[in-house]
Amino acid sequence: MMKTVAKITLLLFTFLLHALNFVTAETWSGLHFVQSPTNLTSSLGKPVKLQCHLQGQGGDDSPPDVIWFQGETMLEMADTNQIQLQVDQDTWVVMSTLRIEAVQLTDMGAYHCGVMDGEELTRSYKGHIQLEGLPHFSVEPQRMSVVANKTVSLLCVAHGPPEPVHIIWLQDGAPLNTLDDPMSRSPSYLNLTGLNRTSSFSCEAHNRKGVASSGSGAVTVLPAQPRDIRASETTNSSLHVTWEPGFGGVYPVTLCSVQARVAGAEPDSAPGELVHNQNVNAPPAAITLAQLDPFSTYEVRVACHTSQGVSEWTPWASLRTAEGVPSGSPVNVTAGMNGSSVILKWAEPEGPINGHLLGYRMEYRTPNSTWELHDSGLDTELSVNLTETLSNISFRVCAYTGAGQGPWSPVQTLALIKPEAEGLQSRDRAPPAFSWHWWYVVMAIAVALALAVLMAIYVARLRRKETRFGEAFEPMMESGELVVRYRARRTYSRRTTEATLNTLGISDETRSYRA
């Protein structure tokens, strides 16, 4: 679009110039250039000036405008100046000057002047601007990073004039080639293999005018990518990851960054979406990723650091944790009678299986037997033949993987009231356990009965003594002292008084007192 507008503007300008000259052409005559631009040699950035002289006769109006061309391109915006000098009464000279304050490479080329003579364009001879001096660079060594021990290619381009230009490469100030080497001709490529140390590269451009130096470009040597990422040890909740750090040139690897994510995450996961993001010292080139889910795939990548920088990340490596046991027990466990058999049914556990489901195990027992274990494989139904059809059956089910079995379902009991009954409901809890509260009540009653029997025996023996001795031992108080009263029996024994007192249990003190 811009090019089209420029062309239209140029055509319009040319048309107006032709129209102006057409109007005034009859007043001028003998238009010709008496001086054309000369050949000019300068240096880059220096000011230059070109002139041409147009001579003509007649005309009372202002002289025609001199047009400058570079090649075939009209210079509309060029810095030009035009002066008219009267040679005699009918002859005049127009001196037109083109100035370039700081000549550039794009300014080199052929220049000429032109003027419209009627409908024709009168041109001067061509003059050339040629630049000569110290070489100048269009491409210099750039700052870059390369992997240690890999090939690196650098480019340096310098120009005259004068030509030719030859280039000397320098590494940390030391030359790498001579002017006689084929690679010295500009443009010059420097290919290095096995660069193991960070270096600074620059160029020297030589021509017959002298030497110019380019800027320096530092080439930083980074470590190669780590390799051989693998899990040396796996559990159902952790991965022990090891790797081999890449070659870092003369700079040892001191640190490695490890990132882990769940497989299937977006390719460009942000750090917040990672399950692990940590820096570890190297050596050893190893880390344990803990608190992982069983039987799950994780993607791990590693990048290692030297004093010069960090390597590229490795591709994501897929690692899997070991199998675990199922997290939950089978659900919807039911039982029903089918003749003399019990049909047990269940559904797959609702929680994570944490591995490959290998099957189900079922345990059952009757009141007169111990637990019996059956493996149903992957079937969710099992038939149990009962030897005692009038007994209750308790049962439970669990799922298992290669790592072992998961939790048992709650023990359920099927009460078999009649052998021919079908579709009996299962109870969700086991038979009630023995209650110690009733044991305490029974013990209390037994102790109370024992105490009552002992009291009865004691009272009976006491009553028998009182009946035998009467009130002989009823205590009474006389003159402040205890007195034992007794009555003589109507029958008397032949025993002596001493024997009688002994029989009655009267102490010696009492006997002496009565005496």
Image (cartoon, rainbow, N blue to C red):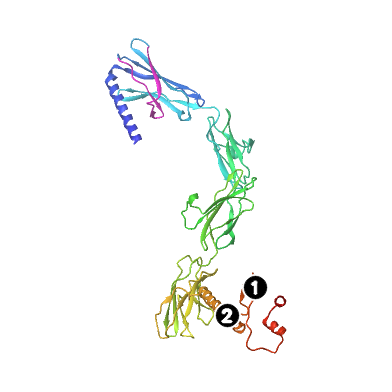
Q: Residue 214 falls in which quadrant of the image?
A: top right
Q: Residue 154 falls in which quadrant of the image?
A: top right
Helix, strand or loop status at disc 2: helix
Are there few (<14), some (14-19), or many (20+) residues within 10 Å of tag 1?
few
Helix, strand or loop status at disc 1: strand
Query: Which residue is drawn at the image coordinates 58% and 41% (left, top)?
Result: 219
- Residue 35 seen in render: no
Q: Earlier in the sequence, mark 2 or mark 1?
A: 2
Q: Residue 428 falls in which quadrant of the image?
A: bottom left
Front position among marks 2 and 1: 1
Are there few (<14), some (14-19), or many (20+) residues within 10 Å of tag 2?
few
* Magenta-colored stretch includes residue 79: yes
Q: Amino acid at mark 2?
A: Val
Q: Nearer the viewer, residue 191 or 246?
A: 246
Query: Which residue is drawn at the image coordinates 49% and 27% (left, top)?
Result: 130
Q: Position of residue 226 (x, y in %)?
A: 59, 52
Q: Which residue is mark 2?
A: 459
Query: Which residue is drawn at the image coordinates 30% and 28% (left, top)?
Result: 12
Q: Nearer the viewer, residue 312 or 257?
A: 257
State left or right for residue 116 relative to residue 406.
left
Q: Position of residue 245 (x, y in %)?
A: 61, 52
State left or right for residue 435 relative to residue 504.
left
**On residue 482, which mark appears?**
1
Q: Which residues are magenta?
A: 61-86
* Magenta-colored stretch includes residue 29: no
Q: Residue furthest left?
A: 23
Q: Amino acid at mark 1?
A: Leu
The N terminus - image quarter:
top left
352 to 333, vertically: above or below: above
